[in-house]
Amino acid sequence: MKNFLYSKTYEKHINIFIEDDISKIIFNKYKDYFSSLIVLESNLRDIFKSKNIKFIRSGKEAKSLDKFLDLSNIINKNKISNLINFGGKELLNLCGYTYNSVDFYKKLLIFIPTTLDSMIVPPLNGFFNLNMNFQENFLKVNGSPDFIYIDPKLLKENPKLRSKKSFIYPYFLGYLNNSKYSQLCVNYIKKNEKLDFHDFVLNGMSNSLSILSSFEYFPGSRLKYKLFNKTYLFKNDIVDIDSVVYLFISYLSFLNGQKIESVYDLIRFINYIGIDIKRIINNFDLSNNTRSFKEIILKNNHLKEIMITNQELKNYLDEFLIFIRGELFWVITQTRAL
């Protein structure tokens, strides 16, 4: 078993454990535990079975106000103090938001990420969000889990938990670390039935923890809300949007001295996993931007935080769109195989 200790503040330390089958151990420990509630995504119904479970459909619906009110009512009615949550980022956000905003006697908030992206980049930003008024992350509350248990074996045994698109997160981590991890993502997509996910998830999560420890946020998490309005984010697939945001970061890194080949490689990979770049770039919206912000890019093969003004963002975006829409882009995506 691998154990990591992550801390964003002196007051809160989060224990993270990675081990095959640990999800079953945690489930069996708490399924009949007094004052505990296990919340699972509905697509896990055939994997974990017990009477004292709350199932919630995955996806953006999980972060709705209705689901929050329903879960809050169950917690208060049954005098719950331990909230144990199995799911992807949306469900973990719902449970974290509920746990930290409802007034009840609290003991433990436990997360068991069950999707590739939530394992590789676990929810450690120090806050949770809900969607409301047709806007992504309209509501926010501060908080963090007490424990995170990551079970890579879930991905190997349950292909539905690792969509092809979700490999953009480990691929981008490989790009940020100038490592062969990106190429490994391609191998896992092509041969994922035969490969073990333990070391793959462990390496990716270790890299993301290193970035979070240094900068306290993941690259692109701020830029995303500068490039798109919250209504568009609410109505569209966040994985698709994140992919284009990462592509823009790679372009900014190119402007700061990184090789253009890395941008081409990322374009081909995004195209390979089935994301329509052209559709997404047509929905950039800078109309609500007024403030400068910090973002993480690669410079001289090292991660560096830079300040970007609103005018600079507009200029960079204009250049990026010319580049993406240019003839060279279409030649690369159509003639060079991944």
Image (cartoon, rainbow, N blue to C red):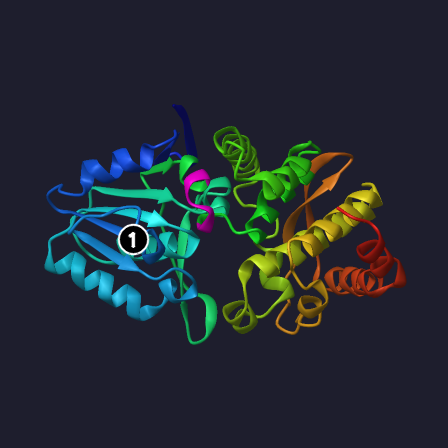
Residue placed at 82% from the left, 50% from the top? Answer: 336
Q: Secondary structure at mark 1?
A: loop
Q: Residue at x 64, y 53 (%)?
A: 273
Q: Which residue is mark 1?
A: 45
Q: Is residue 158 magenta?
A: yes
Q: Is residue 318 left or right of residue 98?
A: right
- Please identify the dominant SS of the magenta region: helix
Query: Residue 212 in the image: x percent, y percent?
Result: 53, 39
Magenta highlight range? 156-160
Closer-to-camera residue (258/205): 205
Amino acid type at circle 1 is Arg
Farthest residue, direction bottom: 133
Q: Position of residue 278 (x, y in %)?
A: 73, 67
Q: Position of residue 142 (x, y in %)?
A: 37, 52
Determine if the magenta segment contains residue 73. Answer: no
Q: Is residue 173 at all visible to an observer of this figure?
A: no
In which quadrant of the rendered view does residue 334 lie? bottom right
Quarter the N terminus occupies: top left
Q: For the point 78% across and 43% down, which residue is it?
A: 262
Residue shown at 36% from the left, 36% from the top: 149
